[in-house]
């Protein structure tokens, strides 16, 4: 839901929750905030920027970070979409570029400030493209009446042959059709090669003038200093066995996007980096640690694929199930319902549902605020 924060559709507080409040009732749990510096396997300890912690069992669940594939200019200037900070930064950036577009007198400057290029045609890229396209047609012309209609365009660029690569052909075709109807310019089989002087350079030789490049093109597992090279697989993911134990260790585990488990017969190349994989692995690992503590045999992890879904635009979504596919308004309702369930806190669930209801009914969300830290005057 980060992309809905970045497009001023919902509040950041709707989808975030304080860790300490979440664990208030857990007397046997301590929360320690810090950045991992190194894992010391010999001493069963980890070094952090706030001190050293000892462990009996270590569970690594640090997730992923944005992968820029060695494109330094892109890394320096593009907008990633991984954290709440990223989403708020993107919201500020988009709104500030619109303010600049209103003041610009040169049509090429207006075009550059209004154009948005999204690199990556997976669920995140598709959802951002759909939201921005609707924002442009429903909101921008109301808030920025002096901005010329059609000056700013949305470009969605993907290196693959289709949008929503991991999903079914029906979902891919539906995403292309809906976004194309919304006016999104879609480039398939096309790489982003560079981003220089507000120009997005494509692999086909073309370039797009744009002051906004949103990078949703891939992730890589976070690095864990202290692990041996033979413990690391493709995409820097940590290799684990069928119990999520890190290969070559006795008491270190890894779950979620950060790990690669090749022992599941249904997924010999590793599991997809999806939330439901991490949730299932986390629950089973907790149960297995209790089994081990009680002298029982742990259970092997087997991923239960419950399906995939993506929202494309208002009232438009696609859902792939193991034995079926559906789209449209009902899929959109299912998407909303499924994404409300895991939100922590009843108050957050209620606020999110109300924000969605108000925004979808009025086509005019009220969260278009530019919030920046004030610079101290020297």
Image (cartoon, grey):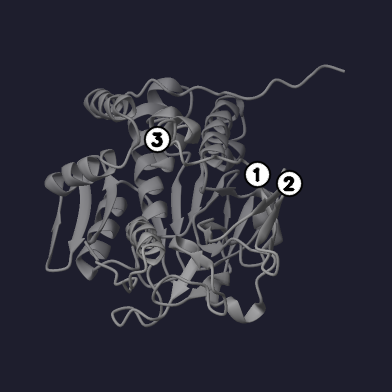
Give the vertical position of 292 relative to 112 (above or below): below
Side (left or right) of 357 relative to 193: left
- The answer to whether one can see residue 149 in this image is no
Q: State how many labels appear.
A: 3
Residue at screen point 37% across, 34% down: 135
Of callouts 2 and 3, the N-terminal one: 3
Based on the displayed image, in which of its 4 quarters is residue 24 positioned?
top left
CA gap between label 1 and label 3 equals 22 Å
Label ID, residue 266: none
* Front residue of this view, candidates 65 and 170: 65
* Front residue of this view, candidates 131 and 198: 131
- The answer to whether one can see residue 350 in this image is yes
Query: What residue is pinned by disc 3?
Result: 15
Residue at screen point 29% across, 59% down: 176
Query: What residue is pinned by disc 2?
Result: 49
Label ID, residue 34: 1
- Marks 2,1: beta carbons within 8 A: yes
CA gap between label 2 and label 1 equals 6 Å
Of callouts 2 and 1, the N-terminal one: 1
Mark 1 or 3, which is nearer the eye? 1
């Amino acid at each position: 839901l980060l992309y809905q924060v970045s497009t001023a559709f919902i509040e950041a507080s709707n989808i975030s929750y304080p860790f300490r409040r979440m664990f208030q009732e857990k007397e046997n749990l301590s929360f320690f905030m810090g950045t991992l510096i190194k894992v010391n396997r010999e001493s069963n300890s980890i070094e952090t920027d706030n001190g050293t912690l000892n462990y009996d069992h270590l569970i690594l669940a640090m997730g992923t970070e944005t992968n820029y594939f060695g494109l330094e200019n892109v890394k320096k200037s593009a907008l990633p979409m991984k954290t709440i900070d990223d989403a708020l930064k993107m919201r500020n950036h988009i709104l500030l570029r619109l303010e600049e577009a209103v003041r610009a007198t040169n049509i090429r400057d207006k075009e550059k400030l209004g154009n948005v290029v999204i690199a990556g045609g997976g669920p995140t890229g598709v959802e951002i493209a759909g939201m921005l396209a609707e924002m442009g047609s429903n909101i921008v012309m109301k808030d920025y009446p002096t901005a010329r209609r059609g000056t700013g365009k949305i470009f969605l660029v993907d290196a693959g042959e289709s949008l929503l690569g991991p999903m079914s052909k029906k979902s891919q075709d539906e995403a292309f059709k809906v976004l194309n109807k919304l006016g999104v310019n879609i480039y398939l089989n096309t790489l982003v090669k560079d981003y220089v002087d507000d120009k997005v350079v494509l692999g086909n030789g073309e370039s797009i003038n744009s002051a906004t490049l949103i990078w949703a093109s891939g992730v890589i597992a976070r690095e864990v200093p202290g692990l041996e090279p033979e413990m690391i697989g493709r995409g820097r993911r940590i290799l684990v066995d069928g119990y999520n134990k890190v290969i070559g260790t006795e008491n270190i585990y890894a779950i979620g996007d950060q790990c690669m488990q090749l022992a599941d017969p249904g997924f010999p190349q590793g599991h997809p980096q999806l939330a439901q994989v991490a949730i299932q692995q986390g629950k089973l690992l907790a149960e297995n640690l209790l089994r081990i503590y009680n002298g029982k045999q742990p259970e092997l992890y087997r991923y239960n694929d419950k399906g995939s879904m993506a929202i494309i635009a208002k009232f438009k979504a696609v859902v792939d199930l193991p034995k079926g596919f559906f789209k449209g308004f009902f899929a959109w309702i299912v998407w909303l319902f499924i994404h409300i369930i895991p939100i922590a806190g009843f108050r957050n669930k209620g606020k999110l549902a109300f924000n969605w209801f108000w925004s979808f009914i009025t086509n005019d969300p009220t969260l278009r605020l530019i919030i920046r830290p004030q610079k101290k005057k020297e």
